[in-house]
Image (cartoon, rainbow, N blue to C red):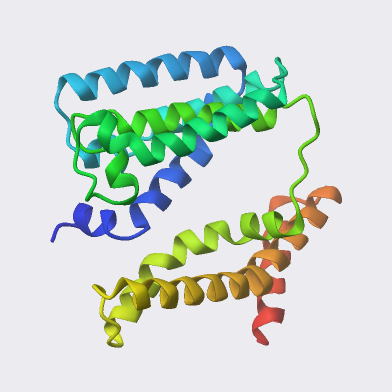
Amino acid sequence: MSTTQREFGTQAWSLRVELFYYLAMIFLSRSFRRVIAWLVASIAYVVYLDQSSAVFFERYATVAGALIAFSAGAFVYYLAKKIRLTSWHLCVSMVLFILYLIFAPWIWGFSSQASGLLALGVPNHYGLYGCVVLGAYLLLSIASSESSIRFPAFGTMLGNIAYPVFLLHWAIAIVVVGVGVPFHEKWFFIPVCFILINAASLLIYKYLDEPIDRVLRRAVREGKSPNSIFTKVITALRVRAGW
Protein backbone atom coordinates (compact mmCIF):
# COMPACT_ATOMS: atom_id res chain seq x y z
CA MET A 1 0.00 0.00 0.00
CA SER A 2 1.38 3.41 -0.98
CA THR A 3 1.72 6.38 1.36
CA THR A 4 -1.14 8.11 -0.42
CA GLN A 5 -3.40 5.09 0.02
CA ARG A 6 -2.48 4.79 3.69
CA GLU A 7 -3.28 8.46 4.24
CA PHE A 8 -6.66 8.08 2.59
CA GLY A 9 -7.43 5.28 5.03
CA THR A 10 -6.72 7.42 8.11
CA GLN A 11 -7.09 11.07 9.11
CA ALA A 12 -3.56 12.00 8.00
CA TRP A 13 -4.64 13.22 4.57
CA SER A 14 -7.33 15.44 6.12
CA LEU A 15 -5.00 16.97 8.68
CA ARG A 16 -2.48 17.75 5.94
CA VAL A 17 -5.14 19.51 3.88
CA GLU A 18 -6.55 21.44 6.83
CA LEU A 19 -3.17 22.63 8.10
CA PHE A 20 -2.29 23.83 4.60
CA TYR A 21 -5.45 25.93 4.32
CA TYR A 22 -5.23 27.26 7.87
CA LEU A 23 -1.99 28.91 6.75
CA ALA A 24 -3.00 29.69 3.17
CA MET A 25 -6.21 31.41 4.24
CA ILE A 26 -4.17 34.06 6.02
CA PHE A 27 -3.46 35.36 2.50
CA LEU A 28 -6.39 33.97 0.49
CA SER A 29 -9.18 35.34 2.68
CA ARG A 30 -7.98 38.83 3.53
CA SER A 31 -10.71 40.50 1.44
CA PHE A 32 -14.03 39.61 -0.17
CA ARG A 33 -12.66 40.32 -3.66
CA ARG A 34 -9.78 37.95 -3.09
CA VAL A 35 -12.17 35.28 -1.84
CA ILE A 36 -14.38 35.71 -4.92
CA ALA A 37 -11.34 35.25 -7.17
CA TRP A 38 -10.37 32.19 -5.14
CA LEU A 39 -13.88 30.74 -5.48
CA VAL A 40 -13.94 31.30 -9.25
CA ALA A 41 -10.55 29.59 -9.59
CA SER A 42 -11.84 26.71 -7.47
CA ILE A 43 -14.88 26.25 -9.69
CA ALA A 44 -12.62 26.28 -12.75
CA TYR A 45 -10.50 23.57 -11.14
CA VAL A 46 -13.62 21.44 -10.50
CA VAL A 47 -14.44 21.74 -14.22
CA TYR A 48 -10.88 20.70 -15.05
CA LEU A 49 -11.17 17.66 -12.78
CA ASP A 50 -14.32 16.64 -14.56
CA GLN A 51 -12.85 17.10 -18.02
CA SER A 52 -9.79 15.07 -17.06
CA SER A 53 -11.90 12.26 -15.51
CA ALA A 54 -10.11 12.61 -12.18
CA VAL A 55 -10.49 9.78 -9.69
CA PHE A 56 -12.30 10.24 -6.39
CA PHE A 57 -9.09 10.65 -4.40
CA GLU A 58 -8.05 13.68 -6.48
CA ARG A 59 -11.48 15.25 -6.10
CA TYR A 60 -11.79 14.75 -2.37
CA ALA A 61 -8.56 14.06 -0.51
CA THR A 62 -5.92 16.32 -2.06
CA VAL A 63 -5.00 19.92 -1.24
CA ALA A 64 -6.14 21.10 -4.67
CA GLY A 65 -9.30 19.02 -4.50
CA ALA A 66 -10.32 20.82 -1.30
CA LEU A 67 -10.11 24.24 -2.95
CA ILE A 68 -13.85 24.38 -3.58
CA ALA A 69 -14.85 23.52 0.00
CA PHE A 70 -12.54 26.02 1.71
CA SER A 71 -13.21 28.82 -0.78
CA ALA A 72 -16.97 28.26 -0.39
CA GLY A 73 -16.59 28.52 3.38
CA ALA A 74 -14.64 31.79 3.08
CA PHE A 75 -17.25 33.12 0.64
CA VAL A 76 -20.05 32.33 3.11
CA TYR A 77 -18.12 34.13 5.88
CA TYR A 78 -18.04 37.41 3.95
CA LEU A 79 -21.49 37.08 2.39
CA ALA A 80 -23.09 36.54 5.81
CA LYS A 81 -21.86 40.00 6.79
CA LYS A 82 -23.57 41.61 3.82
CA ILE A 83 -26.99 39.95 3.72
CA ARG A 84 -29.66 38.73 6.13
CA LEU A 85 -31.77 35.64 5.46
CA THR A 86 -35.08 34.84 7.11
CA SER A 87 -35.64 31.73 9.19
CA TRP A 88 -37.47 30.31 6.16
CA HIS A 89 -34.09 29.83 4.47
CA LEU A 90 -32.81 27.88 7.45
CA CYS A 91 -35.73 25.45 7.25
CA VAL A 92 -35.38 25.04 3.48
CA SER A 93 -31.60 24.56 3.58
CA MET A 94 -31.86 21.92 6.31
CA VAL A 95 -34.54 19.98 4.43
CA LEU A 96 -32.64 20.18 1.13
CA PHE A 97 -29.38 19.04 2.72
CA ILE A 98 -30.97 16.04 4.44
CA LEU A 99 -32.94 15.05 1.34
CA TYR A 100 -29.78 15.29 -0.72
CA LEU A 101 -27.92 12.95 1.61
CA ILE A 102 -30.74 10.44 1.25
CA PHE A 103 -31.38 10.68 -2.50
CA ALA A 104 -27.90 11.47 -3.89
CA PRO A 105 -27.37 7.88 -5.16
CA TRP A 106 -30.64 8.01 -7.09
CA ILE A 107 -29.97 11.52 -8.42
CA TRP A 108 -26.48 10.75 -9.69
CA GLY A 109 -27.00 7.12 -10.60
CA PHE A 110 -24.41 5.37 -8.43
CA SER A 111 -24.86 2.43 -6.12
CA SER A 112 -26.63 3.09 -2.84
CA GLN A 113 -24.39 0.42 -1.33
CA ALA A 114 -21.65 3.02 -1.03
CA SER A 115 -21.57 4.66 2.38
CA GLY A 116 -20.68 8.00 3.90
CA LEU A 117 -18.94 10.63 1.81
CA LEU A 118 -17.96 8.01 -0.75
CA ALA A 119 -21.63 7.87 -1.74
CA LEU A 120 -21.50 11.62 -2.32
CA GLY A 121 -18.42 11.70 -4.51
CA VAL A 122 -18.09 8.65 -6.72
CA PRO A 123 -15.84 9.50 -9.72
CA ASN A 124 -17.59 11.20 -12.66
CA HIS A 125 -20.55 12.20 -10.50
CA TYR A 126 -21.24 15.46 -8.68
CA GLY A 127 -22.61 14.15 -5.43
CA LEU A 128 -19.66 15.60 -3.51
CA TYR A 129 -20.05 19.07 -5.00
CA GLY A 130 -23.77 19.09 -4.42
CA CYS A 131 -22.98 18.46 -0.78
CA VAL A 132 -20.58 21.42 -0.77
CA VAL A 133 -23.15 23.77 -2.35
CA LEU A 134 -26.04 22.75 -0.09
CA GLY A 135 -23.76 22.72 2.94
CA ALA A 136 -22.68 26.28 2.12
CA TYR A 137 -26.33 27.32 1.80
CA LEU A 138 -27.10 25.77 5.20
CA LEU A 139 -24.11 27.50 6.78
CA LEU A 140 -25.11 30.83 5.24
CA SER A 141 -28.66 30.39 6.51
CA ILE A 142 -27.32 29.95 10.04
CA ALA A 143 -24.66 32.67 9.91
CA SER A 144 -26.89 35.33 8.31
CA SER A 145 -30.18 34.54 10.03
CA GLU A 146 -32.27 37.57 11.00
CA SER A 147 -33.24 35.89 14.25
CA SER A 148 -30.70 34.94 16.89
CA ILE A 149 -29.98 31.20 16.79
CA ARG A 150 -29.11 29.69 20.13
CA PHE A 151 -27.89 26.15 20.50
CA PRO A 152 -28.87 24.21 23.63
CA ALA A 153 -26.19 22.85 25.93
CA PHE A 154 -26.42 19.43 24.28
CA GLY A 155 -25.80 20.96 20.86
CA THR A 156 -22.82 22.90 22.20
CA MET A 157 -21.39 19.72 23.67
CA LEU A 158 -21.75 17.92 20.34
CA GLY A 159 -19.87 20.75 18.68
CA ASN A 160 -17.10 20.56 21.28
CA ILE A 161 -16.46 16.86 20.70
CA ALA A 162 -16.97 16.88 16.92
CA TYR A 163 -13.28 17.12 16.06
CA PRO A 164 -12.12 14.51 18.60
CA VAL A 165 -14.80 12.20 17.16
CA PHE A 166 -13.35 12.75 13.70
CA LEU A 167 -9.81 12.06 14.89
CA LEU A 168 -10.70 8.95 16.88
CA HIS A 169 -13.44 7.15 14.97
CA TRP A 170 -11.20 5.26 12.55
CA ALA A 171 -8.65 4.19 15.17
CA ILE A 172 -11.29 3.02 17.63
CA ALA A 173 -13.10 1.05 14.93
CA ILE A 174 -9.82 -0.71 14.11
CA VAL A 175 -9.21 -1.48 17.79
CA VAL A 176 -12.75 -2.83 18.20
CA VAL A 177 -12.27 -5.14 15.23
CA GLY A 178 -8.84 -6.12 16.57
CA VAL A 179 -10.23 -7.28 19.92
CA GLY A 180 -12.67 -9.59 18.17
CA VAL A 181 -15.89 -7.68 17.57
CA PRO A 182 -17.13 -8.83 14.12
CA PHE A 183 -17.43 -5.93 11.70
CA HIS A 184 -20.31 -7.55 9.81
CA GLU A 185 -22.47 -7.74 12.93
CA LYS A 186 -23.58 -4.13 12.65
CA TRP A 187 -26.19 -4.37 15.43
CA PHE A 188 -23.33 -4.92 17.90
CA PHE A 189 -20.34 -3.31 16.19
CA ILE A 190 -21.94 0.13 15.64
CA PRO A 191 -23.25 0.65 19.22
CA VAL A 192 -19.92 -0.42 20.72
CA CYS A 193 -17.97 1.95 18.48
CA PHE A 194 -20.48 4.75 19.08
CA ILE A 195 -20.14 4.52 22.86
CA LEU A 196 -16.34 4.24 22.86
CA ILE A 197 -15.79 7.02 20.32
CA ASN A 198 -18.00 9.51 22.14
CA ALA A 199 -16.65 8.59 25.59
CA ALA A 200 -13.04 8.99 24.45
CA SER A 201 -13.90 12.26 22.69
CA LEU A 202 -15.49 13.68 25.84
CA LEU A 203 -12.35 12.83 27.83
CA ILE A 204 -10.10 14.46 25.23
CA TYR A 205 -12.21 17.60 25.23
CA LYS A 206 -12.35 17.84 29.01
CA TYR A 207 -8.71 17.10 29.77
CA LEU A 208 -6.95 18.38 26.63
CA ASP A 209 -8.97 20.67 24.36
CA GLU A 210 -10.75 22.73 27.01
CA PRO A 211 -7.65 23.50 29.14
CA ILE A 212 -5.66 24.51 26.05
CA ASP A 213 -8.51 26.65 24.75
CA ARG A 214 -8.84 28.38 28.12
CA VAL A 215 -5.11 29.19 28.23
CA LEU A 216 -5.06 30.43 24.64
CA ARG A 217 -8.06 32.73 25.09
CA ARG A 218 -6.64 34.22 28.27
CA ALA A 219 -3.24 34.76 26.66
CA VAL A 220 -4.74 36.42 23.58
CA ARG A 221 -6.86 38.75 25.73
CA GLU A 222 -3.76 39.71 27.68
CA GLY A 223 -1.85 40.42 24.45
CA LYS A 224 0.85 37.85 25.11
CA SER A 225 3.55 37.11 22.52
CA PRO A 226 3.37 33.84 20.48
CA ASN A 227 6.31 32.39 22.45
CA SER A 228 4.61 33.20 25.74
CA ILE A 229 1.36 31.60 24.54
CA PHE A 230 3.22 28.45 23.47
CA THR A 231 4.92 28.24 26.88
CA LYS A 232 1.59 28.60 28.69
CA VAL A 233 0.02 25.82 26.59
CA ILE A 234 2.91 23.43 27.30
CA THR A 235 2.71 24.26 31.02
CA ALA A 236 -1.03 23.56 31.06
CA LEU A 237 -0.49 20.21 29.36
CA ARG A 238 2.24 19.24 31.83
CA VAL A 239 0.01 20.14 34.78
CA ARG A 240 -2.83 18.03 33.36
CA ALA A 241 -0.49 15.12 32.77
CA GLY A 242 1.00 15.41 36.25
CA TRP A 243 4.55 15.92 35.00
Q: Quadrant of residue 182?
A: bottom left
Let me know if residue 125 appears in the view. Answer: yes
- Relative to 147, 243 lies left or right: left
Q: Looking at the figure, which quarter contains the N terminus?
A: bottom left
Task: Return the x and y of residue 62 as percentages of the image width and height.
Answer: 30, 40
Instruction: Name the residue nearer the viewer: 99 or 128.
Output: 99
Residue 58 vs 76, above or below: the answer is below
Q: Quadrant of residue 11?
A: bottom left
Residue 131 vs 162, above or below: the answer is above
The image shows a total of numbered marks equal to 0
- Relative to 236, 25 lies left or right: left
Task: Return the x and y of residue 179 as percentages of the image width and height.
Answer: 31, 87
Q: Residue at x 80, y 34 (%)?
A: 148
Q: Residue at x 18, y 29 (%)?
A: 124
Task: Return the x and y of residue 174 as percentages of the image width and height.
Answer: 31, 74
Let me know if residue 67 appears in the view. Answer: no
Q: Residue at x 64, y 83 (%)?
A: 241
Q: Residue at x 20, y 55 (%)?
A: 5
Q: Quadrant of residue 94?
A: top right
Residue 65 vs 187, above or below: the answer is above
Q: Looking at the figure, which quarter contains the C terminus?
A: bottom right
- Relative to 177, 41 lies left or right: right
Instruction: Name the residue nearer the viewer: 57 or 2.
Output: 57
What residue occupies the far right of the structure in this picture?
Answer: 222
Task: Return the x and y of residue 41 as percentages of the image width and height.
Answer: 38, 16
